[in-house]
Amino acid sequence: MLFGLFKSRSQAPEPPVVAQAARADALLRELEWTVIRRLDGLLQGDYRTLMRGSGLDLADLREYQHHDDVRHIDWNVTARLQTPHVRVFTEDREMAAWFLLDLSPSVDFGSGEQRKSQVLLGFVAVLARLISRHGNRVGAVLYGSRGQPVVDAVLPARGGRNQVLQLMQMIRRPPALSGSKTAGKDGTTRLADLLRAATHTVRQRCTVFVVSDFISEPGWEQPLGELARRHDVVAVRLLDPLELNLPDLGLVTVRDAETGEQLLVDTHDSGFRQRFARIAAQREAQLRESLTRAGVDTLELATDDDLADAVLRFVDMRKRRAQPRRPLPAHLGARA
């Protein structure tokens, strides 16, 4: 396929546990010093917008917005004002966030200094640390972390810095040498398997981050929508600029890391590059439409993005979604 310009994950032997833990700790310290420290000065108490709890107490009423949970519509106020209004709740102090991580071979692609897998690791480490150090718990379901297109690891939700380090170690773990499948139809990503596994693993309502490039066999849209009806779901879409537009590089051999298929293409051909860009744009439009239909918030994270800026974009999006479009009449503001 035209979106298969992927580099294979290196088949290096697994490092000793102590060395692996040290590397994860060093990376987290670096992120704490460079990204999280910077965010501390910019978020200004907006950490709660990273997550949404199931809610305990009614705090306010506001006009209905697209993607709001219809179960929170206050029908009495809606009938009185002839405009849909939803109840806004005070969220739980202690909440849980789950990361559904697509670690399939396509996520190892990167045309610049970073691969999508590195962006995934940095984003998860930063978000998990921001969330866990404010008294909340984080857990994860991993897909493809051992080189096979299956859900192969679950990290139960817990709090603390050590939990974040354990999650980082699981993400950085190289695929097993034995039984690895990277060629043929059985090697293609089935994101629906990850989403369905999450419905059985994540029981209580929480915030769920689905981190993937969404290069997958069809069929993930329905389970994503079902997950969004039970949880606050955020789709973190990983992408690389080269997946959208091809530069003029002459004759290039490209290989699909998931099927192993190789193809010689002439990127000097302007017609080929235009067709590639057109197909990529069509896929972009279809993907965004599918995510919108599923009713999830979406954060696009490119390999050339600044991680702190991406987190701030996400927080700003959540704040705008939570703000009422217009003030509620005074006689309704105190309604219990």
Image: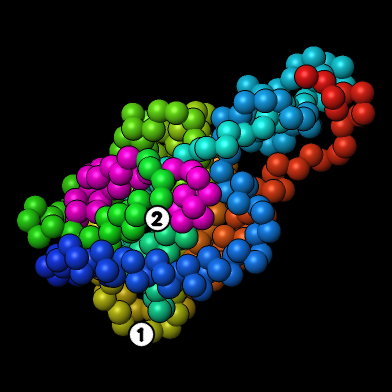
**Tag 2: Cα neighbours inside 10 Å, few (<14), some, or many (≥20)?**
some
Quadrant (top left/top right/bottom left/bottom right) for the N terminus: bottom left
Q: Secondary structure at mark 2?
A: helix
Based on the picture, tell me whether residue 148 belongs to the magenta stretch.
yes
**Tag 1: Cα neighbours inside 10 Å, few (<14), some, or many (≥20)?**
few
Q: Which x, y percent locates residue 265?
A: 31, 75
Q: Residue at x 33, y 66 (%)?
A: 25
Q: Is residue 38 left or right of residue 216?
A: right
Give the extent of the magenta segment.
127-156
Q: Give the number of callouts.
A: 2
Q: Is residue 201 left or right of residue 284?
A: left
| Sequence order check, earlier mark of 1 and 2 | 2
Question: Is 276 above or below relative to 138?
Answer: below
Q: Nearer the viewer, residue 208 or 186?
A: 208
Question: Is 232 above or below relative to 167?
Answer: above
Question: Is 332 above or below relative to 16?
Answer: above
Q: Nearer the viewer, residue 113 or 50?
A: 50
Q: Given the current orientation, which residue lies at the most extreme left position? A: 178
Q: Which residue is mark 1?
A: 250
Q: Residue at x 34, y 79 (%)?
A: 266
**Three-letter amino acid code of the residue under disc 1:** Gly
Q: Which residue is mark 2?
A: 161
Q: Residue at x 53, y 49 (%)?
A: 134
Q: Secondary structure at mark 1?
A: loop
Quadrant (top left/top right/bottom left/bottom right) for the C terminus: top right
In this figure, which colouring scheme has been used for the structure? rainbow
